[in-house]
Image: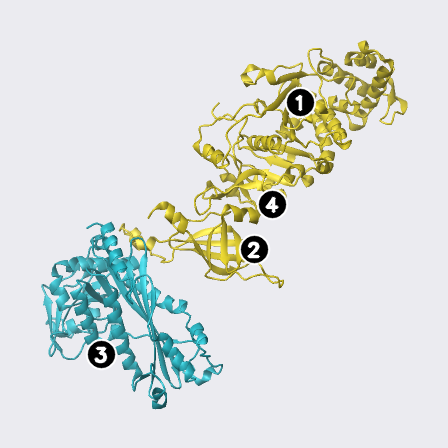
Chain colours: A yellow, B cyan
Amino acid sequence: MNQDLEVNMMSWIVLGEEKSKVKIVSKSVVTGLLPKGSYLTVEQEDSKFILRVDISFQSQPYSPTPLIADMDLTSLIQDQKCQNIILATRIKDISKRTDGLIDYLKPQNIARRSNQEEINLAVGSVKDGVKVFPATIYANENQLLTDNEGNYISVSLPEDMYYHQILICGKTGTGKTVAAKTLSQFFVEKIGGCVLAINVKEADFLRMDAASKTRNQSIFKEWNYLKEDPHGIGSFTIYYPASAEITASKKVNPDLCKKITLDVKKIDPESLIGLLTGISDKASQSLPNIFRYWQTRKMIAQSPRDFTFMSFLNYFNEEDSREFSTMNVRGETSTIKLHPGTYENIQRNLDRATEFFDNKEAITIDESDILIPGKMSVIDVANKNGVQFGSILLRDLLNKIVNAKSRLDYDVPILIIIDEVHQFYNNETATEALGDLDTICRTGRSMKIGVIFSSQNPNDIPRGLSSVINTKIFFKSDRNEAKKHGINITNEEMESLKKGFACCTIFDMSQLKIVKFPLSYAGVFEGD
Amino acid sequence: MNNNSKFKLLNRHYKRNKNDVVNINKIIIHPNFNETLKELSDLKIKLPKIGSHENWDFQVMLFPNSGNLVNSIGDIKPLKLNAENGHKWIKSEYPILAYDESIQNFLALEGIAYLFSHALVLHGEEDYIPSIYISFYFFTRAKSILDKSKYILESDNPSVDSKAIYASERKNFICNTVPENSIILIDGPLIGGQISSITIDMNRRLLEKNVIPIFIVKNSASNLVTQYIEGLKDLYNSDMHWCYNVLKTGERTSFFSYIDKYSKEKGKIFCYLKSFNGSPQRIELHVETFNKYHSYMNDLMDLVYYLMLAQGDFKNPQVRSIAIAEKFARESLKLFNFQLLMRKIGLKPTINESRFGG
């Protein structure tokens, strides 16, 4: 029989309901198992039911004896007939009933694989969201779901997902950065938002201007299905500390790179906490107020020549008495005498940070450089002292962005990507910067600020953030950790996840369990 | 002819019969089925809800007393069976089929109803392909009922008459369904009881279609061999007793011929086959079948042996395909919702079950 014809004829028979699951058996033309996670549609008079396959296994209707095989005799092919038994959950009823009752799903009805339209309806797929492929795992094999005609099924994730925060977890090389790239490219190109990504490792996010390259035919097939070609992001800028270099080995386009420095005149005093390491929280609170007093005085004096970070350092070093005037955020002044240990610690950290400030060859950036529709900005901190620089800059930028959006100066949505959180988190100063994200995560929804945290271990995410993250995507990682985050998957399934495949809970899309992210159209270079 | 060609030919055979009553992979209902039920309803004859499964054990029916000539064909010695050779026949150009039946009765005050399910199973390309024929009869002695009915049958002895109807139905169903140039394995004896002549007629019609009918008998208490063959007399309780002792597992006896004293028609060739270390089975063929396909006999016995092994039931050795046919026959009666049908035509089984013997 023609294989296409066979696929078209594939159907299953409803047997009835058992323990709240619909029991289904394959018709004899079905020659394989319908994988878990697939969707089936049953049409019954005026109603339609969409079911999700939760358990799928084979049964042998003729129960042949092993004797023949044991005697090394050739088996009867008829005895080898297998059937597929399915236990499925009703996830969507389309019914015209108005009497408040729910339709029976009657035995002996015929089920077929759901088509794209039906799956959209069942999982709540939106029209214009970022597309992923619902997938399945069976016997260590990952595969994409298809409809009865053998076409891929895709699901569009809701835009609101971005503003309800996203966590992406997975071991190195499992696909979490690629997923973040896919999500960020969609955000700038289709939603018209802007992206601010912190690049902490190699050239992960530094080549998003270039079209992805692959020789994998299945990737081309996926792109073809999605009617997309690989292409770079048009508006793309890399910012890196003036004290560092972006090496040629990263194959980054130098024309898109901009050296940046911190401007002592504009920096939010609170951001300086990011400089401090090995100091208690209470002690660290002194520095912003000391700096604010100095900064304000310099502004009033209008003496740009000595309005530099070095002059602040000198000011700080000259106070042998360790007694400083301070100004709080409300402009109230006071004095404080620092403990010798605190004083020396701040001194050391300030000295180390001088290279981040007032570099004449570099520019300074603020929210106006980031909040541009369709632009992706990457701050590269994958260099010496980069994380420390990045934590000060990020904190400063986040404050400015939130303030600007609060003032309604900008309505462009923004997506902030903290890739490899665990690398960022190793540094105390960065932890401080991430702490600020907590507020953003809780309040950013109304301002269309989204955050993607990407990490090998979900425990790297700042405490308290987990509860405000509504979308959790786990590539191959620790199953127990995934379980803590509400992902229901077996050990075997987690261990079987191949590159690009992930289990998930998606905001407002509870029926979607396992997905494959299409390869990002930009910034991925397989075999490079 | 290779296996694919065989199935192409089979497809043609069943397409040709598309508009006939008989078809493959279908449940066929006797044309008078619903009318009979309707009459029962009109006459307010109530049947019990659940029928009794009827075991017509043709297996143990003895040969007629008129037989007097049993000869061995060749030396009496155990012969080795070759299961792998038997399997080759599954793949040969000959389609393999098997037949079994399931019968239920429903005893009412007014008479007795019989529900027959005849199942024929073909070894298809990848699956067993069943053809089921279901019929329903009601027998009564009551003239008052018969006067008002067209489909209810008169009978002083429903037990005998139902067997005659069953045998006749079986003959027609098998003869109309089985493709030409095939092999059919039938559960039960060729000659035994009052249905012998119908079975022999079925055998004749099958031979006309170049079909090889092979009858499989288990649990027989007959003593044809031990009664008539010199040297075995008085030594064994039955033929099975003899075979159990002389045959090793995977062996059969040589063929014996039985010829009826009064009717040449009632002749048969048989042997005993021991597939497991248990009771042997008797394999029977009509004399004409044996004569026509003499050269295939060793292979066909290997085929039966292979199918016994395929079933793999040590305690109750059975040909695999017959066991499958039996399952289809039984399951079709379950699938075929007799109670629902009765309700549909207005027959409501009474709550007072104690009225009925079923």
Using the numbered discs, state the Cα–Cα distance from disc 1 to disc 4 in whole angstroms: 35 Å
Q: Which mark is residue A387?
A: 1
Is residue A38 rendered to the left or right of residue B223? right
Look at mark 4 in the image and give the residue it sits on: A509
Q: Nearer the viewer, mark 2 or mark 3?
A: 2
Disc 4, SS: loop
Q: Residues within 10 Å of mark 2 (few under 14, many from 20)?
A: some
Q: Nearer the viewer, mark 4 or mark 3?
A: 4
Question: Which chain is home to disc 2?
Answer: A
Regarding mark 1 in the picture, which secondary structure is present there?
A: helix
Cα distance, mark 2 to mark 3?
61 Å
Badge nearest the viewer, 1 or 2: 2
Residue B64 occupies quadrant: bottom left
Residue located 14% across and 63% down the image: B254
- Position of residue B353 relative to residue A147, above or below, is below
Badge 3 and badge 1 both on one subunit? no
Q: Residues within 10 Å of mark 1 (few under 14, many from 20)?
A: many
Considering only order in the chain, which callout, 4 or 2, is on the residue closer to the N terminus? 2
- For badge 3, the amino acid type reads Gln
The structure residue drawn at horizontal position 78% and vertical position 19%, both measured from the top left corner, is: A266
Q: Which residue is mark 3?
A: B194
* B194 is higher (above) or lower (below) than A115: below
Q: Are marks 1 and 2 in contact (CB under 8 Å)?
A: no
Mark 4 and mark 3: span between their CA atoms? 71 Å
Tell me where residue A250 appears, x and y as whole percent. Answer: 55, 18
State how far apart marks 3 and 1 are (Cα). Answer: 100 Å
Q: Nearer the viewer, mark 1 or mark 4?
A: 4
**Mark 1 vs 4: CB contact within 8 A:** no
Q: Which residue is mark 2?
A: A94
Asked which quadrant contains residue A374, the reply is top right
Q: Amino acid at mark 1?
A: Val
